[in-house]
Image (spheres, rainbow, N blue to C red):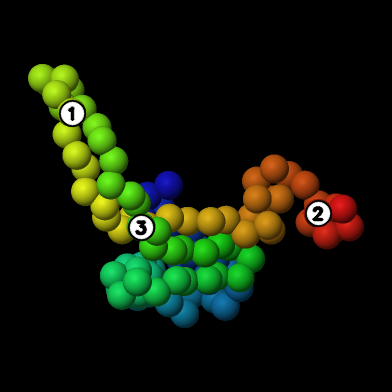
Amino acid sequence: MTKADLVELVTAQIAQTAGPTISKKDCARVVDTFLDAIKDALREQQNIEVRGFGTFKIRQRKTRMARNPRTGSPVEVAARPVPVFKPSKELRALIADIDISELTEA
């Protein structure tokens, strides 16, 4: 699914529930603003938690040794921050097609 597909889906969903009150252009702005807010928070090393969906975090990757594929010589890859996503229990259960009450009872 691309961002354009997401905008189309959100626009159609809003049109079903609230009528044609929002244009596709406005919906695209909402999606862009949401994604920009996530990027800005991650840039500032903040975690983002969306209940029922998951958590976006920044994790520090350690320095490691790799190899140059052309020459085969070892190369040191510096430590750096990387974004990670951890899905919520509800999202994992939805993808696995499991009833969420089964997870809470176990």
Callout count: 3
Report which residue position mark 2 lands on: 103
Task: Report which residue position mark 1 lands on.
Answer: 74
The amino acid type found where label 2 is placed reads: Leu
Relative to 22, is 13 above or below? above
The residue closer to the viewer here, 95 or 40, is: 40
Q: Residue at x 65, y 50 (%)?
A: 92
Residue 42 percent coordinates (x, y): 35, 69
Q: Residue furthest top?
A: 71
Q: Is residue 72 above or below residue 97?
A: above
Q: Identify which residue is drawn at 28% across, 47% down.
A: 63
4 relative to 98, above or below:
below
**Neighbours of disc 2 within 10 Å: few (<14), some (14-19), many (20+):** few
Residue 41 appears anywhere in the view:
yes
Q: Nearer the viewer, mark 2 or mark 3?
A: 3
Q: Secondary structure under badge 2?
A: helix
- Residue beneath the point at 24% across and 32% down: 66
Q: In the picture provided, is 78 more to the left or to the right than 47?
A: left
Q: Is residue 23 visible?
A: no
**In the figure, residue 84 lies in which quadrant?**
bottom left
- Check whether the beta carbons of the residues at disc 1 and disc 3 lie within 8 A of each other: no
| Secondary element at tag 3 | strand
Which of pointers 2 and 1 indicates the residue nearer the eye? Answer: 1
Instruction: Return the residue at label 3.
Output: 60
Q: CA distance from mark 1 to mark 3?
A: 22 Å
From the top left corner, tell me how far across and down residue 55 is, in percent: 52, 64
Instruction: Compare marks 2 and 3 and give the one earlier in the sequence.
Output: 3
